[in-house]
Amino acid sequence: MIRLNTLEERPDLLRKTLVHDDNVFIEAREFYQWNKDMRHHKILVYKDRKPAYVLSYQKNEPEGINKHDPKVQMQLSNFWDYSVYDNDCDFTYVDRYDLIIFETLDEYAWASARQIIDQNRKIKLAFLDQNAALFFDEEKVAIAENEEELFGKYPELKEGEILRVHSPMKWSLSDFFNNDVPSVMVMTSLYWLKRKFAYGNLNPDKTFYLIKHPVKENGITAVAANVIGLVEMLKKKHPDIIPVVDLSVEGDFNQFTLGSGEDVWRMFFKDICDIPLEEIYSSKNVILDQNSNISFNPYLIEFVYGEGRKQVKFKDILEYQEEVNDYVCNKLQGLFPQDKRVLGVVARGSDLLILNAANKDYSFISNEELFEKVKAHMNEGGFDYLFLATEDVNVLRMYEDSEFKDRLITIDQTRVDYRIQADEQRVLFEIFTQGNSDPYQRTLDYIAVLEGLKRCNGLCGNAPCGTVNYVLGFDPAYEFVDVG
């Protein structure tokens, strides 16, 4: 990002000067793009032959989070190659608002406001930075020192939905859902489909969206949801763009490959595109994905942390590889008695329920409370058997020692004993990546559990976890669903 500073930050050693005009941010960006060794130097800008202000380069780095944390998959674009003259940016996010207040004039605030004005959007714009007067006509942009002055001068701006935009690249869910976001997020919302690369000259009449992001701490249900959710989003917003998946990311330490760089998607799922991946990497128009659990793309934040990931529909889109499908069919063969009604029970263990470890605000009940629910459903619903899905060995023991022990159906899979002190505060990702179980085999067994749940007649669970959302994404013919 290019920042605008006062003359107080005028450099002692002057290495670059520019003359002010409406596109000075573009000139500065191009200078820093092609002169990497000069990025620590500031640019003095003249106006009317006098020093007016200083521009400086700041690398795009998220604030407020540990970028080395496994749960963080931040990949921030530096937006080297965007154009303010693009006429097909995505205005879906900004169009929700009646007023956007930019607290500070920086490159992304300037570019976003410029796009909104040039494309004649109906959004009103305001800056709480007098430097905005250097670039914008006050007939198009309201300028004030603070919000009190702004609404005093323009009381009509108080009406409607307001988005507040600040310069620091702070990642905060609470701020996001309170309509207070960094300028890089507004920029990303406009240009997220503009990060286009030419890998070759094939398919000049097609545009591909390459979903290529690190898996990190995600389990297989989250992997599937992140990909298919994005595929569904693209189909709704841009049906002309063809999604392609390649989850082979160098250095991505996850529970499936342990950092080998193998494509996690093709380990378990079929391609979602008929065109071979090798051909994609020789095509002319390829948009490179920046998806992650934690990103500055507002559409993806809403998907992951809103209701989006819970509502993904996998039916008719997601297909297992043939060897995965064969393994699951063999694993489930003869497991479910014919013509018997089975209650599916998802009993997530401690790693989900320890909020300081899982870092999620889940609505859940304890496994003891769930057991009472299960008893009621089994007795009142007349179920013959209970299919238990749990990764917690102690939860399994609880059911094996209960009145349902002779009506209990389970699948042999890797399970964890959270009563072991070393594991009691760790999430599954940490336990699995440091354990000795075979990652591929462990995941195949878990997929068999997921497919077993789909064969049940009803579903009961203690939390709306990935297992529950994944199974419901196939629209199984359940008599009822009782979760959390």
Image (spheres, rainbow, N blue to C red):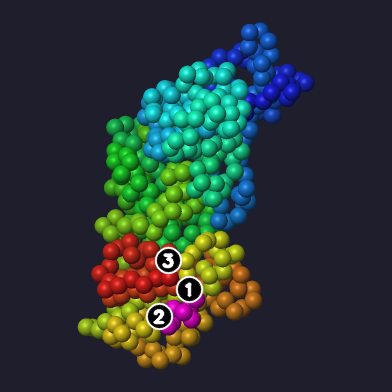
- The residue at which mark 2 appears reads as 373
Extent of the magenta region: 366-372
Q: Mark 3: few, some, or many residues within 10 Å (few <14, many ≥20)? A: some
Q: Check contact, mark 2 vs mark 3: CB within 8 A.
A: no
| Residue 122 figure quarter | top left
Q: Mark 2: few, some, or many residues within 10 Å (few <14, many ≥20)? A: some
Q: Nearer the viewer, mark 2 or mark 3?
A: 2
Residue 312 image offset from top left, x and y in percent: 35, 56
| Residue 287 figure quarter | top left
Secondary element at tag 1: loop
The three-letter code of the residue at mark 3 reads Pro
The three-letter code of the residue at mark 2 reads Lys
Of the two numbered discs 2 and 1 on the same chain, state the one appearing first in sequence: 1
Q: Residue furthest left?
A: 339
- The quadrant of the picture occupied by the C terminus is bottom left
In three-dimensional space, the C-alpha distance between marks 2 and 3, rounded to whole angstroms, equals: 15 Å
| Residue 466 figure quarter | bottom left
Q: Residue furthest right?
A: 12
Residue beneath the point at 56% across and 52% down: 72
Say whether residue 370 is magenta: yes
Please tell me whether the stretch drawn in magenta is mainly helix, strand or loop. Answer: helix
Q: Residue furthest top?
A: 49
Residue beneath the point at 31% across and 75% down: 458
- Label annotation for residue 365: 1
In three-dimensional space, the C-alpha distance between marks 3 and 1, rounded to whole angstroms, equals: 10 Å
Residue beneath the point at 28% across and 47% down: 274
Residue 468 seen anywhere in this rendered image of the structure? yes
